[in-house]
């Protein structure tokens, strides 16, 4: 209480006086009721501050004294009421004080009793309980620790064996042992050491999964049946068959990207000839633009070989799953011991089958996009004809692989090769027409000496028509029977080899032997005829006779003279020489061009119509040149012979019609030969 409040508090004498004063209870209650509520609001209420703030600005002594007396009366009434309440509760207070004193005495007695009891219990514990029950507890603990030690040794052996199996790539055995370790450790999981062991076993299991993922990625390039079987069995033990299939497709996609990038990067760095590492940071599409013309075909071949290995691995993967599921269906209940496990296995099979089927199109689409980027990265319009044919042949073989792989028509590759082919063929045809013009301008129109048995099949450009295989297949791999022809590429090269292996034996086909020796074959043959007849040592006795009776075998009357035999041989030779084709160098060149164009039609079926149209242009150009060199003078003679102008016009029209008809017939013949070869 503040000093003012202490000052305002009535003393004991005042209280006694107040109690002794006769007061009216009703009046006292009215005085208490008139006290403001703010005085009872809280204990921290400052009444002095409150009363001072209520003072008016102009103070009046009389009013202040009256207000002070009013406050004194209120204080006196409150003090009297408090004193009355204290006196009224005095007996109860004394009674409660006695009870508290009695309780304190009882508590002191209880504390003494408890102290004595604890002292006696401690003596009993030391004398009996701790000695006997401690022995039992230690024995029980010893037995538990012995079992724990045995389990720990077993777990240690299993962990060491699991690591050994993991190094030997026996993933199913390692996972099986690791799961057994976890099962054994779960029995003693309340020990701290076992808790740490469980975490280590979980880390080991995760490490096995990582190595399992690496092992799964290896099957994308080189498929091994035993290796893949272990990997799939390991994933089955982990219950992650579907996850394994998702990871497998991701690895195949990554394998395609890494394979093509490494192949192209190797050729780019080889051609660059320096150790510049900027190529490794390039995108694959940009890297393809740095391939030179000399390394274009070898790089394309190696690229297709590498992609073939990836697709072959995927094909073998599907084949493994088909055979595996057939074995499981043949032996039901061998792997699944409950209906729930059987349903889960069925779901996994269905998921894997759909995933593999959908992955075919996805894998082939990735292959097409990679090869497309490589094809369009280099301008091949200036390539040599044989080099471009090799490119077309490799892509044609790749499209055949795609059709057998997933039944795709390879629209992406067809469009890419069509674009390159159109650009190349336009440039090639323009160059060939210019070359033909130079041939015609320098043609002497002399007989080209060819052998009497010459045919277009002997020319290198027409060799493809007699082959049932693609030029990229080596003769050693040429099918020998009808059954081998029906095999797909994946079946032919299942045990080894590659359909994109470039052959070297075709070099021999480029050396043709269609021309006569030194252009004097007729003279040498004629000499040989006379030389043969000068010596009759090798002529049989029967041929020296005039005739031989085939029925009776009688001897001839007179032998045939040597001149007669020489005349017969000479007539046969003259007949063969008369049947020899009449050719010029330009004619032979046109025939070669027709063969090249037909070979291009065979490989480039989408632009076959444009090619045959260009064949017609070649023949028209050649025939028009022949007409220009030899036909105009004849027309002048004919016009002089037939004096009437209508006859000249008619003959000229007939000649033009014959030229057009011959050109169209040639186109039909070429197209017919091509269709026969294709079908």
Image (spheres, rainbow, N blue to C red):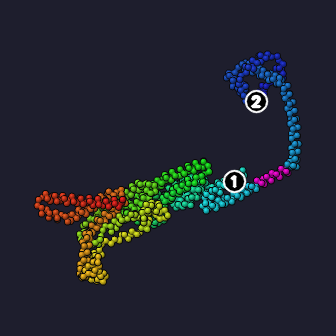
Q: Which residues are magenta?
A: 130-144
Asked which secondary structure carries label 2, the reply is: loop
Residue 75 higher or lower than 272, as above or below: above
Looking at the image, which residue is at 20% across and 65% down?
629
Q: Is residue 104 left or right of residue 283?
A: right
Q: Which residue is mark 1?
A: 185
Residue 140 colored magenta? Answer: yes
**In the image, is residue 504 part of the stretch drawn in magenta?**
no
- The mark closer to the camera, 2 or 1, is 1
Nearest the camera: 220 or 568?
Answer: 568
Look at the image and tell me in which quarter the C terminus lies.
bottom left
Location of residue 163 (image quadrant): bottom right
CA–CA distance in space, label 2 to label 1 = 75 Å
Q: Which residue sits at x=61%, y=57%?
A: 172
Instruction: Determine whether label 2 and label 1 are within 8 Å by CB.
Output: no
Task: Name the spot of residue 263 as percent of width and height, x first.
Answer: 47, 62
Can you see residue 182? Answer: yes
Crowd rating for badge 1 (residues with CA inside 10 Å; few <14, some 14–19, many 20+): many
x%, y% of residue 655? 19, 60
Residue 544 falls left or right of residue 187: left
> Which callout, 2 or 1, points at the residue further toward the start of the chain?
2
Q: Which residue is mark 2?
A: 2
Furthest toward the front, the residue is 552
Between 205 and 96, the residue placed more toward the observer is 205
For residue 11, side relative to residue 404 (left or right): right
Relative to 347, is 518 above or below?
A: below
Which class describes the residues within 10 Å of circle 2: few (<14), some (14-19), or many (20+)?
few
Q: In what element is the residue under mark 1?
A: helix
């Amino acid at each position: 209480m503040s000093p003012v409040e202490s000052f305002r508090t009535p003393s004991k004498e005042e209280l006694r006086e107040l109690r002794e004063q006769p007061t009216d209870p009703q009046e006292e209650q009215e005085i208490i009721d008139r006290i403001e509520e703010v005085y009872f609001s809280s204990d921290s209420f400052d009444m002095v501050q409150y009363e001072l703030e209520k003072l008016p600005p102009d103070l009046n002594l009389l009013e202040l004294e009256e207000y002070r007396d009013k406050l004194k009366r209120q204080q006196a009434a409150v003090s009297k009421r408090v004193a009355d309440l204290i006196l009224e509760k005095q007996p109860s207070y004394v009674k409660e004080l006695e009870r508290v004193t009695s309780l304190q005495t009882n508590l002191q007695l209880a504390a003494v009793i408890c102290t004595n009891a604890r002292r006696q219990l401690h003596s009993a514990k030391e004398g009996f309980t701790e000695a006997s029950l401690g022995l039992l507890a230690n024995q029980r603990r010893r037995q538990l620790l012995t079992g724990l030690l045995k389990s720990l040794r077993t777990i240690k052996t299993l962990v060491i064996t699991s690591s050994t199996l993991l190094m030997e790539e026996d993933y199913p055995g390692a996972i099986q042992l690791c799961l057994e370790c976890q099962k054994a450790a779960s029995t003693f999981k309340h020990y701290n050491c076992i808790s740490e062991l469980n975490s280590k076993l979980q880390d080991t299991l995760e490490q096995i999964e990582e190595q399992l993922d690496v092992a799964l990625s290896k099957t994308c390039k080189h498929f091994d049946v035993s290796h893949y079987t272990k990997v799939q069995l390991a994933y089955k033990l982990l219950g992650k068959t579907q996850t394994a299939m998702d990871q497998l497709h991701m690895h195949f996609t990554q394998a395609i990207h890494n394979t093509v990038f490494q192949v192209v990067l190797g050729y780019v760095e080889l051609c660059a000839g320096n150790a510049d590492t900027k190529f490794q940071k390039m995108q694959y599409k940009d890297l393809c633009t740095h391939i030179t013309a000399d390394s274009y075909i070898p790089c394309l071949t190696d690229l297709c070989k590498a992609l073939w290995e990836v697709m072959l691995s995927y094909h073998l993967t599907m084949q493994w799953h088909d055979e595996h599921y057939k074995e499981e269906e043949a032996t039901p209940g061998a792997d699944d011991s409950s209906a729930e496990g059987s349903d889960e296995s069925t779901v996994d099979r269905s998921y894997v089958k759909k995933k593999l089927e959908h992955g075919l199109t996805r894998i082939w689409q990735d292959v097409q996009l990679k090869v497309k980027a490589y094809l369009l990265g280099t301008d091949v319009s200036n390539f040599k004809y044989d080099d471009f044919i090799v490119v077309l042949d490799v892509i044609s073989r790749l499209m055949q692989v795609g059709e057998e792989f997933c039944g795709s028509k390879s629209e992406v590759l067809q469009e890419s090769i069509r674009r390159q082919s159109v650009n190349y063929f336009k440039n090639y045809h323009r160059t060939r027409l210019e070359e033909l013009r130079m041939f015609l301008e320098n043609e002497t129109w002399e007989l080209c000496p060819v052998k009497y048995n010459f045919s277009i099949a002997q020319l290198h450009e027409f060799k493809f028509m007699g082959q049932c295989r693609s030029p990229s297949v080596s003769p050693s791999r040429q099918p020998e029977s009808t059954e081998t022809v029906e095999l797909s590429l994946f079946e032919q090269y299942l045990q080894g080899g590659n359909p994109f292996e470039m052959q070297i034996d075709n070099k021999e086909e480029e050396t043709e032997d269609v021309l006569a020796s030194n252009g004097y074959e007729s003279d040498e043959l004629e000499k040989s005829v006379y030389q043969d007849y000068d010596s009759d040592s090798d002529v049989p006795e029967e041929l020296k006779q005039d005739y031989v009776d085939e029925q009776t075998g009688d001897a001839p009357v007179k032998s045939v003279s040597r001149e007669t035999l020489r005349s017969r041989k000479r007539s046969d030779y003259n007949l063969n020489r008369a049947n020899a084709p009449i050719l010029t160098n330009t004619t032979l060149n046109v025939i070669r061009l027709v063969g090249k164009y037909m070979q291009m039609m065979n490989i480039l079926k989408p632009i076959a119509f444009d090619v045959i149209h260009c064949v017609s242009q070649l023949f028209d150009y050649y025939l028009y040149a022949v007409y220009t060199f030899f036909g105009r003078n004849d027309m002048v003679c004919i016009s002089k012979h037939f004096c009437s102008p209508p006859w000249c016009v008619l003959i000229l029209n007939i000649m033009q019609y014959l030229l057009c008809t011959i050109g169209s017939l040639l186109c039909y013949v070429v197209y017919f030969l091509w269709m026969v070869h294709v079908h």
